[in-house]
Image (spheres, rainbow, N blue to C red):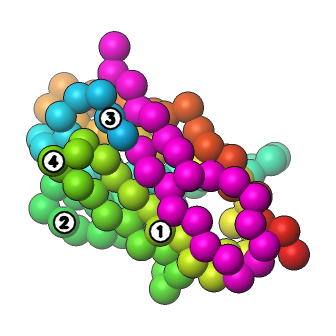
Amino acid sequence: QVQLVESGGGLVQAGGSLRLSCAASISVISANTMGWYRQAPGKQRELVASITRGGNINYADSVKGRFTISRDNAKNTVYLQMNSLKPEDTAVYYCNLYFMIGGRQYWGQGTQVTVSS
């Protein structure tokens, strides 16, 4: 069973930083896309950032210039560095792993990020 284990969430004041990590129990070298999503109470899950196997990166407009996604294939891990955090960034953050071949997709259990004003 594939597991994605997230860590690094917590409570931080506005303007602060957090670094999320997501470690996979399988090799991610062939994963087409690794990404981070978030879901705030009462809202739909939304894409925050994604990175392809080729290194192409996509960010939600709301986090551009503040968040940085990266992946370390050797460690089977994807990271999300979050700077200049705002209260509206408060949500449960989920990592996602997608393999185009077979259409396999995996989700982490989620990690809570709370930004106080």
What range is drawn magenta here?
A: 1-22
101 sits left or right of 96 in the view: left
Residue at the image position 51 percent from the left and 62 percent from the top = 19
Q: Which residue is mark 3?
A: 24
The three-letter code of the residue at mark 4 reads Ala
Q: Which element type, helix, strand or loop, lies under badge 1?
A: strand
Q: Nearer the viewer, residue 89 or 15?
A: 15
Q: Earlier in the sequence, mark 4 or mark 3?
A: 3
Asked whether disc 1 touches disc 2, contact meaning CB atoms under 8 Å apart, the reply is no
Q: CA distance from mark 2 to mark 3?
A: 18 Å
Q: Which mark is residue 55?
A: 2
Q: Which element type, helix, strand or loop, lies under badge 2?
A: loop
Indicate the position of residue 93 as horizontal and vertical percent values.
Answer: 59, 49
User: Does any portion of residue 51 appear in the rendered image?
Assistant: yes
Q: Which residue is mark 4?
A: 74
Residue 113 versus residue 25 in the image, above or below: below
Q: Which residue is mark 1?
A: 81
Q: CA distance from mark 4 to mark 3?
A: 11 Å
